Image (spheres, rainbow, N blue to C red):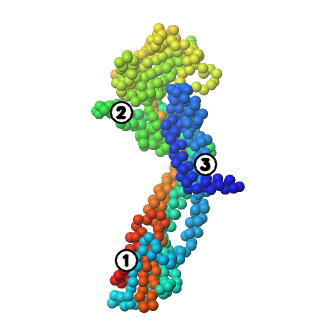
Amino acid sequence: MGYLRFFWRQLTSMRTALFLLLLLAIAAVPGSLFPQRSSDPNGVSLYFTNNKDLAPVLDKLQLFDVYSSAWFSAIYLLLFISLIGCVIPRTAFHLKALRSKPPRTPARLDRLAAFSAFEIAPGQLDAASAPITATSTVEAARQNLRKSGYRVQLFENRGPDGPEFSVSAERGYLRETGNLIFHTALIGILLAVGIGGGFGYTGQKVLVVGQAFANVRISFDSFNPGRFFNDNQLQPYRLVVDDFTAKYEKENLNAFGQPIDYTLKVTTYEGSGGAKKQVLKVNSPLEIGGNQVYLLGNGYAPFVTVKDPTGKVVFSEKVPFLPQDANLTSLGIVKIADGLSSQVGMRALLYPTAVKDSAGASASNNPDLYNPELALVVYKGDLGIDKGVPTSSYSLNTDKMTEIAGPGIDAATIRLKPGETATIPGGLGSVTFENAAPKSDAKNLQLSVPRFVSLDVHRDPTQGWVLFFAILVLGGLLTSLFIPRRRVWVKVIEASDGRLRLEYAGLARGEDPGLDAAVADIAARHSQQLGLKLTS
């Protein structure tokens, strides 16, 4: 029991809570460094493709699922328990302090850091003032302090120089109230985030311009529901991708080709309502059906058609390619499982503005479509999909396949411009890089390759609560930082010869550079209230 009490005291100390809060912030950093399955499953797949040795190790450490990992959850729960264990006893103590009376006036006020004293000689009054007594003077001080927001208490004592009447005052409990609000609001944020994660969901969908999406679970490419989610939470709506426009820098040579703006135009249908034209931008999500739809990414989706030797179309799709660099050199996979004499797989690279580098290799020097070229490396054999084991659309397993067109073999890599067709080696058929531009504008290369967008659909029913608690966190923090905690005393000593000695003193809890000025201001206002001209 002794060890348990020690552990509990350590866990619920403010130092531990601050340490865990810092640790939680550090633990969240990998979530920004590595793609997360909950928000970017395609990025995770690409990371596995590009880092075949490192990715499995990172996956065992749950670095692709940071926010649902065991170690992140452990820190989260410990912080939650620590804050509760810290806040509850402090709240009880604070409530008790609020009900208690200010402490008795110290016997020697001159020993305190902020101190001043005045004497009133007999008859030292303004002509219009009423006679001053010790009790009326201390009562005036009590009223003055109470108007300034102090909690006050009167005391009477017999001192060595005569009767002593004093008022003890304190204020600044709002500082501790703000501190408790800050920590309670942190607990509220943790609760809201946890509950919101349980009842919310996130989903991703890749759409080529012209395609539609309906808010049903089967329509998502990937879907990550919370623990308490059910399909009834999916409100009916659909959207159609009408157009996507990307603007790139064309004037500043130092930033040539850098993206300036992305604009997605959609038509939405919600419930029984009619069509509604809306616009999405990177930092301007679409609000529909209780969801926020974010424009997460974009790229090119070349229109590829494959025919068998007789000219029959066996594959004709707009295939989303994953961007590999800032110039949108993009990688895509084409799989033809049926229709040809053998299964065929193609690993393709799209160069939006194709050029040759100094070594003679192809590259793209601009993300826009000025000279699009599609390069295909072709394999035949077993795609590994006949056994029903799911495989990624963005990877091609060539262990049981033979390269029939590509670098280093007799049949070179197939290179196509929009509208061109090439024969697949081995008499397997042909492949066409379709020109997607309208016939009336077929020479417009900017329209020759369709674009795709990646949408992130997010639902969090506790967003409003998170905002509310975040405002409380900020308000509580500012209150605890800028409201001083002070105790002040005003003592009136009545001497036997009729003189009155007024003493003013203050004491701060912690650093308070304004304490001396506050005590001086209390003395000045008190003397002004009495109509006195005092000499120290």
Task: Determine whether the residue tagged by mark 2 lies in a helix, strand or loop.
Answer: loop
Q: Is residue 399 visible?
A: yes
How packed is label 1: few (under 14 Cα within 10 Å), some, or many (20 or more)? some
In whole angstroms, how far apart are the C-alphas of marks 3 and 2? Answer: 43 Å
Rendered-image quadrant of the C terminus: bottom left
User: Looking at the picture, does residue 502 appear above or below residue 86?
Assistant: below
- Marked residue nearer the N-terminal end (3 or 1): 3
Asked if residue 162 lies left or right of residue 124, the reply is: right
- Give the secondary structure at mark 1: helix
Residue 475 screen position, x and y as percent = 47, 59
Q: Which mark is residue 258?
A: 2
CA distance separating discs 1 and 2: 65 Å
Q: Residues within 10 Å of mark 2 (few under 14, many from 20)?
A: some
In percent of width and height, residue 510 lies at 47, 64
- Characterize the local packing of mark 3: few (<14), some (14-19) or many (20 or more) Cα atoms within 10 angstroms: some
Name which residue type carries label 3.
Leu
Contact (Cβ within 8 Å) of mark 3 with mark 1: no
Q: Position of residue 524 (x, y in %)?
A: 37, 77
Asked whether 139 or 194 is in front, the reply is 139
Q: CA distance from mark 3 to mark 1?
A: 53 Å
In the image, farthest residue toward the right = 1
Tell me the residue that label 1 is attached to. Answer: 524
Residue 77 circle label: 3
Position of residue 108 measured from the top left corner of the image (x, y, whole percent): 48, 77
Of mark 3 and mark 2, the one earlier in the sequence is: 3
Give the label, 1 or 2, closer to the camera: 1
Check contact, mark 1 vs mark 2: CB within 8 A.
no
